Image (cartoon, rainbow, N blue to C red):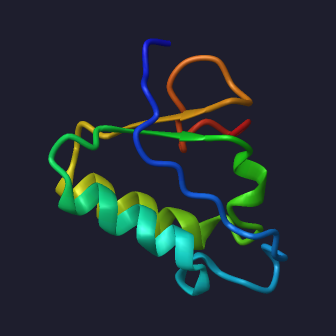
Amino acid sequence: MGFQGVVIFVEAAKSAYHYSVNKRKKMSELKEFILSNTNANSVIFYDESRLTRDITDFYKNIIVPLREKKSQLKLFSTQHEGEWNENDPLV
C-alpha cells in the first residue's frame, strides 16, 4: 500500500474483555505518539479484533480524540481491503 512502518506498538496479549483501552499502555502510547507527531498520518492494525471487546471504548477513547485533532488520519487493517471504516457494520 506504499506505507513505511516507522513505529510499531505491540501489546502483550491480555483479555480485551478485562482491560479497556484506557488501561492498556501501548494504546496510550499510540495515541500520544500520533497526537504529538505531525508526520503520523496513518495507523495499520494487525488484528483489530484484539483491540477491544467493548467496541465503544476504542471508538470513544481512541478514534474520536484522534479524529478531533487529526481529521485526515487514516486507519487500515490487515484484515480488510482499503481504508478501515469504523462505521462499517462488518468492521
Residue at the image point whose x is 31% and y is 40% from the top: 73
Instruction: Report the residue at 43% width, 21% height from top.
Output: 3
Image position of 44 (left or right of 39) = right
**Would you say 80 lies left or right of 37 here?**
right
- Residue situated furthest top in the rendering: 2
Q: Is residue 66 left or right of residue 24?
A: left
| Residue found at the very far left of the displayed protein | 38
The quadrant holding residue 25 is: bottom right
Asked if residue 40 is positioned above or below residue 16 in the image, the reply reads above
Q: Quadrant of the C terminus?
A: top right
**Residue at (44, 47) in percent of width and height:** 7
Q: Is residue 42 above or below residue 7?
A: above
Residue visible at 29% across and 38% down? 41
Image coords of residue 65 (percent x, y): 31, 65
Q: Please state the total of marks drawn on the protein image.
A: 0
Up/down of 34 relative to 85, above or below? below
Residue 29 rendering spot, x and y as whole percentages: 43, 70
On the image, the x and y values in percent for residue 31 come to 38, 65
Would you place residue 34 above or below residue 74 in this image?
A: below
**Picture coordinates of residue 76, whole percent (x, y):** 54, 32
